[in-house]
Image (cartoon, rainbow, N blue to C red):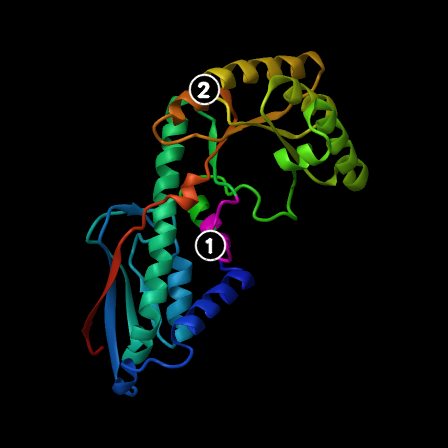
């Protein structure tokens, strides 16, 4: 399992503090009594958030032991026990909702990401699916982890990890192919070869300008499958003629229903819906007995 970062731990600490920082008016009656419980999946899913599950119970003063085979990215069947938690009853009940909410959200994203990734690979072997920055404020770092657990690419985690010249940047530079050229040139002058640069374009001339400018990744955005096919072929041909290589990404309006129509014409398919529209996976905690 991939250890939690300090940023992720701080986020989970804040979630616990928000939920029970002023005390649990109900569970405090147990006053040190010990007990145990099991965490059960109520849906078929791809598991994600298990590191967070362990951490939340630990911070509350209990211990979570994962079941054999319960790993991030593993297939989980409905009714499966994914963990046993032990400790003071008050701690179990304090951690319950934060832990369940976290793995419900993350497993939902991982499940949808796996479905999209499998569909893309079946249609066009080698084409990868990625998320976007359309994530929940603050919780986005864990949503990116869930994308990875589901087999998808997380895309850039924040604005500091890759330069991405998007539509509004290009519009602010005057719009059109000339703005693409000048935008990439300014970024290269500032950062040199030490960062990747992605450019978002919506037409073939702008895509060719991105090739001329030396963009590492060209996002063909908001195109129909037919227009993407044409743009992909023209931009790739242009890059080959000029001795350049580039990665093509397709985004905008891509759904599970039409993903197979886009996948053959891009190296990466990015889908905001993997995070903002992923259905929750249901989990429950069942108290058992004193240990």
Is residue 133 or residue 287 the one in the foreground?
133
Residue 184 against residue 123 in the figure, above or below: below
Identify the mark nearer the N-term, 2 or 1. 1
User: In the rendered structure, which segment of residues is drawn in magenta?
Assistant: 133-144
The local secondary structure at tag 1 comes to helix
Residue 243 against residue 147 in the figure, above or below: above
Report if residue 221 is visible in the image.
yes
Q: CA distance from mark 2 to mark 1?
A: 31 Å
Quadrant of the frame with the C terminus: bottom left
The local secondary structure at tag 2 comes to helix
Quadrant of the frame with the N terminus: bottom left
The residue shown at (50%, 23%) is 223
Residue bearing the label numbered 2: 225
| Image quadrant in which you'd find residue 212 | top right
Report if residue 71 is visible in the image.
no
Instruction: Please provide percent x and percent y for residue 81.
Output: 23, 58
Is residue 254 or residue 156 the one in the foreground?
254
Q: Residues within 10 Å of mark 1 (few under 14, many from 20)?
A: many
Query: In the rendered structure, does residue 161 fall within the stretch colored magenta?
Result: no
Is residue 111 or residue 170 the one in the foreground?
170
The residue shown at (51%, 41%) is 132
Instruction: Please provide percent x and percent y for residue 206.
Output: 66, 22
Instruction: Please provide percent x and percent y for residue 257.
Output: 34, 28
Is residue 115 or residue 252 the one in the foreground?
252
Query: In the rendered structure, does residue 136 fall within the stretch colored magenta?
Result: yes
Name, please, the residue furthest toward the right: 189
Q: Is residue 153 left or right of residue 206?
A: left
Residue bearing the label numbered 1: 142
| Image quadrant in which you'd find residue 205 | top right
């Amino acid at each position: 399992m991939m250890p939690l970062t300090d940023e992720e731990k701080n986020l989970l600490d804040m979630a616990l503090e928000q939920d029970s920082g002023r005390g649990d008016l109900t569970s405090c009656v147990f006053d040190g009594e010990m007990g145990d419980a099991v965490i059960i999946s109520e849906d078929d899913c791809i598991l994600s958030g298990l590191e967070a599950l362990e951490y939340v119970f630990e911070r509350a003063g209990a211990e979570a032991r994962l079941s054999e085979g319960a790993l991030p990215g593993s297939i989980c069947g409905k009714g499966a026990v994914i963990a046993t938690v032990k400790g003071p009853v008050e701690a179990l009940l304090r951690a319950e909702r934060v832990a369940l909410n976290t793995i419900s959200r993350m497993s939902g994203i991982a499940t949808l990401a796996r479905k999209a990734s499998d569909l893309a690979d079946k249609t066009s072997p080698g084409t990868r699916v990625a998320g976007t920055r359309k994530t929940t404020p603050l919780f986005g770092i864990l949503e990116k982890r869930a994308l990875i657990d589901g087999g998808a690419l997380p895309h850039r985690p924040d604005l500091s990890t890759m330069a991405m010249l998007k539509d509004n940047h290009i519009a602010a530079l005057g719009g059109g192919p000339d703005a693409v050229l000048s935008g990439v040139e300014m970024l290269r002058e500032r950062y040199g070869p030490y960062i990747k640069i992605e450019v978002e374009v919506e037409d073939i001339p702008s895509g060719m300008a991105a090739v001329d400018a030396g963009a590492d990744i060209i996002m063909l955005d908001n195109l129909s499958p037919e227009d993407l096919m044409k743009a992909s072929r023209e931009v790739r041909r242009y890059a080959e003629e000029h001795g350049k290589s580039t990665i093509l990404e397709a985004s905008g309006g891509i759904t599970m229903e039409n993903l197979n129509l886009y996948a053959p014409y891009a190296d990466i398919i990015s889908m905001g819906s993997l995070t903002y529209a992923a259905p929750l996976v249901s989990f429950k905690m069942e108290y058992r007995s004193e240990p």
